[in-house]
Amino acid sequence: MPRAPAPSVRPFGCRHPRREEARPPAIRHSPVHRRRECPLSAGDCRVVGVKAPLRPKLGLPSVDQEVTLLNLQASELRELLIPCLAVPRWVDELVDAAPYNSREALLQTARRAATPLTPDEIAEALAEHPRIGETPVGEGAAQSFSRGEQASSDSDDVVVNAAIASGNAEYERRFDRVFLIRAKGRSRAEILVELQRRMQLDDSEDIAIVGSELADIALLRLESSLETLS
């Protein structure tokens, strides 16, 4: 006769776990398996728990740029400034105040020296600016700046472009100067709206705006020039 299986022996005091207490083992996810939705773009998502490398902040000057600015010769600084704003008094003031220990110091001085510009200085500076919609002629630094600024607001809208060309001519007949506006950061449609608005102003109101626009353009150009320092 076959023997009955021997009963299992448990250590004293040990109980079998209750059936309802049995739980499947918890699944632990390593940090590389846990992701969050990226608020930027699909190609820039980061893994939660993994420290991303620091990225340089755009627009901040490097140490090399600051050192180069501090050591600029007067002739080098003058060459940097003239394409930004063709006003000798403005250039002379900035050269005389050198050296600058930071880019911010130079930009602040440049803004103060350009505020305000006299009517004669405005007329002198306008001579270096083409009409909106026209291709700048020449290969100098000022012409290179103008090409980039015009291209930033370029448009294939023939109606808007024709209206700007017509508005340019009407503005020149009214004020006897080229219509000037900071093109960078503005669309051609926005430029047309501002041109039409300024046609309703008197000469003293508009020339004050021209001076402010020249200062804005000068500061943008100067910032761009400083980015090339190394």
Image: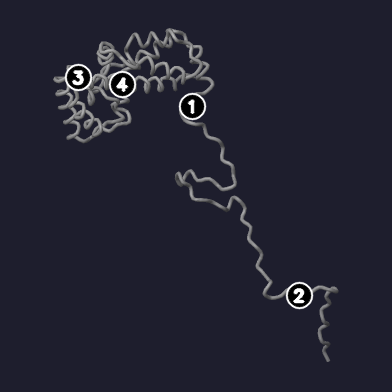
Q: Crowding near pointer 2: few (<14 within 10 Å), some, many (20+)?
A: few
Of labels 3 and 4, the one closer to you: 3
In the structure shown, which secondary structural element does the residue marked by tag 1 occupy? loop
Of labels 1 and 4, the one closer to you: 4
Q: Residue 133 at x, y = what percent? A: 23, 26
Q: Is residue 79 left or right of residue 30?
A: left
Q: Is residue 8 left or right of residue 164?
A: right
Q: Amino acid at mark 2?
A: His
In the structure shown, which secondary structural element does the residue marked by tag 2 occupy? loop
| Dot placed on the residue nearer the N-terminal end, 2 or 4 | 2
Callout 2–callout 4 Cβ contact below 8 Å: no
Viewport quadrant of the N terminus: bottom right
Q: Which label is found at residue 85? A: none
Q: Is residue 218 left or right of residue 136?
A: right
Task: From this view, report whether residue 154 is shown above or below residue 21.
Answer: above
Alpha carbon distance from label 1 to label 2: 68 Å
Q: Amino acid at mark 3?
A: Asp
| Dot placed on the residue nearer the N-terminal end, 1 or 4 | 1
- Residue holding disc 2: 16
Residue farthest to the bottom? 1
In the structure shown, which secondary structural element does the residue marked by tag 3 occupy? helix
Q: Amino acid at mark 4?
A: Ser
